[in-house]
């Protein structure tokens, strides 16, 4: 028997079909054209060749496990210029990844920065190599505030002293804002730089995902329920993912990148990152975004060197949200990269790396340190 989704009599299957159809409609034509021009076997071989040749996601650091407040084990890696722990005055950069990603999404930034200073990369709870959220499995809803608490646990365990630069993309930027809300003293005493990349301080419910007005309204009303249903059918959804790999690849590209000429290997890497996130984790965090309102927390960062960066074709956290963040942070550098999408750090790595290096130079000066030569060279003329 088909389960009803509510008093209106819409079936669970119908609810899923309507909502997924709203999001996928624009991509379906692209898949159809692709099938006419490139055979399935050819596409499969191309994916296999890209997987074998691309080095993305292979950078590894010294592993650590950090216990969150609820006992969830968070996976952390530390990249340091030397094998030992730095002195208390050394600058440390903490990279916080986004929704449905993991620390490997920082591949290009990690490759560019790891030789010049200490990096801390971590997988947010339920993502990557971190443990599935214990509190969520016990029935507590996921929240961005909990992620802020997790970041504090990582800092306490891995970076207990010394100046810190916090870099967050998408959900990772929200995590940094939650930390600022919970521990403003850190931003007065230890945080000497902040980068907020492709993120938002609130008003998530106004995001249209690039859909027409009617489609956006339908998704806003039905989306959370659809994801909840999908999250309860993990086996079925994961099997369907494999069958629908062509459609998924088009959707991933649409919502990840803005330009049409993205390196196929980079697009494939993004596809792998997103595919590695189980549907129940997607469902776990999606409702948390609507409750994220941290505009007032931005005031805590006032005076701290800041970079606010986004792509002008970001459909998930539109550039207008970055502009709003920059207005709340006088003195912040606002960078909007033309035609770039949500995964801007993968799509435009050279420019993102250069802007981050410039921020790190400003942060080092604020901390009374001399920027490492490799970082100064990467930043270029200031």
Image (cartoon, rainbow, N blue to C red):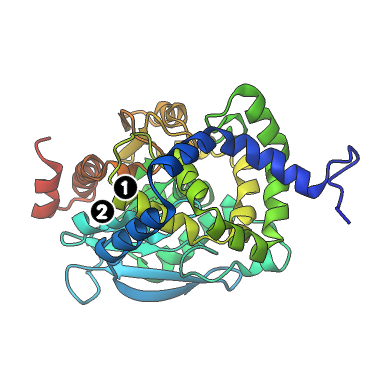
Q: Quadrant of the C terminus?
A: top left
Single out the residue that lies furthest toward the right: 7
Q: Residue shown at 91%/40% (left/top)?
A: 7
Spot occupied by residue 68 in the image (x, y as percentages of width and height): 54, 69
- 338 shown above or below 279: above
Count of number-bearing discs:
2
Point out the residue furthest to the top here.
213
Q: Residue at coordinates 48% horizontally, 41% vertically from top-left?
A: 31
In front of the other: 107 or 97:
107
The quadrant in which residue 120 appears is bottom left
> Where is 324 relative to 283, above or below?
above
Q: As drawn, is 193 to the left or to the right of 350?
A: right
Which residue is painted at 34% across and 63% down in the image? Answer: 48
Tell me the distance, in whole angstroms, between the alpha carbons under discs 2 and 1: 7 Å
Q: Is residue 160 above or below residue 229?
A: below
- Residue 156 picture location, percent across and down: 42, 67
Residue 229 location, x and y as percent? 73, 54
Element assignment for label 2: helix
Is residue 300 visible from the viewing direction of this image? no
- Residue 14 position by quadrant: top right
**Does residue 248 appear to the left or right of 377 in the view shown?**
right
Task: Classify residue 236 by image quadrant.
Answer: bottom right
- Residue 223 horizontal/vertical position (percent): 68, 42
State left or right for residue 271 relative to residue 207: left
Point 51% across, 49% down: residue: 248
Determine which of the numbered discs, if any, sits on residue 40 in the image: none
Give yes or no for contact between labels 2 and 1 (Cβ–Cβ under 8 Å). Answer: yes
Tell me if residue 219 can be seen.
yes
Q: Nearer the viewer, residue 179 or 21?
A: 21
The residue carrying mark 2 is 108
The numbered disc on residue 346 is 1
């Amino acid at each position: 028997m088909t389960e009803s989704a509510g008093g209106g009599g819409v079936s669970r299957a119908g609810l899923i079909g309507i909502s997924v159809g709203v999001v996928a409609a624009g991509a379906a034509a692209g898949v159809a054209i692709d099938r006419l021009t490139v055979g399935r076997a050819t596409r499969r071989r191309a994916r296999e060749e890209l997987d074998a040749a691309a080095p993305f996601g292979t950078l590894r650091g010294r592993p650590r496990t950090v216990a969150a407040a609820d006992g969830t084990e968070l996976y952390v890696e530390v990249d340091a210029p030397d094998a030992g722990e730095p002195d208390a005055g050394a600058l440390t950069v903490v990279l916080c990844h986004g929704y449905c990603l993991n620390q490997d999404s920082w591949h290009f930034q990690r490759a560019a920065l790891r030789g010049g200073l200490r990096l801390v990369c971590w997988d947010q709870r339920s993502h990557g190599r971190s443990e599935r959220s214990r509190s969520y499995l016990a029935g507590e809803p996921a929240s961005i505030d909990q992620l802020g608490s997790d970041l504090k646990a990582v800092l306490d365990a891995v970076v207990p002293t010394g100046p810190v630069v916090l870099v967050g993309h998408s959900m990772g930027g929200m995590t940094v804002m939650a930390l600022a809300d919970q521990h403003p003293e850190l931003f007065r005493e230890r945080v000497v730089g902040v980068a907020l990349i492709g993120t938002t301080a609130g008003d998530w419910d106004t995001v249209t995902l690039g859909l027409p007005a009617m489609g956006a309204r339908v998704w806003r009303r039905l989306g959370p329920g659809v994801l909840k249903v999908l999250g309860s059918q993990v086996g079925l959804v994961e099997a369907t993912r494999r069958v629908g790999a062509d459609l998924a690849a088009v959707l991933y590209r649409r919502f990840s990148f803005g330009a049409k000429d993205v390196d196929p290997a980079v697009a494939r890497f993004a596809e792998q990152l997103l595919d590695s996130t189980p549907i129940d984790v997607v469902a776990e965090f999606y409702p948390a975004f609507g409750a994220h309102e941290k505009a007032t927390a931005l005031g805590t960062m006032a005076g701290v060197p800041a970079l606010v960066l986004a792509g002008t074709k970001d459909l998930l956290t539109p550039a207008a949200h970055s502009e709003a963040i920059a207005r709340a942070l006088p003195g912040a550098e606002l960078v909007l990269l033309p035609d770039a999408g949500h995964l801007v750090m993968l799509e435009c790595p050279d420019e993102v790396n250069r802007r981050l290096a410039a921020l790190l130079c400003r942060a080092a000066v604020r901390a009374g340190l001399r920027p490492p030569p490799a970082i100064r060279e990467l930043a270029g003329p200031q």
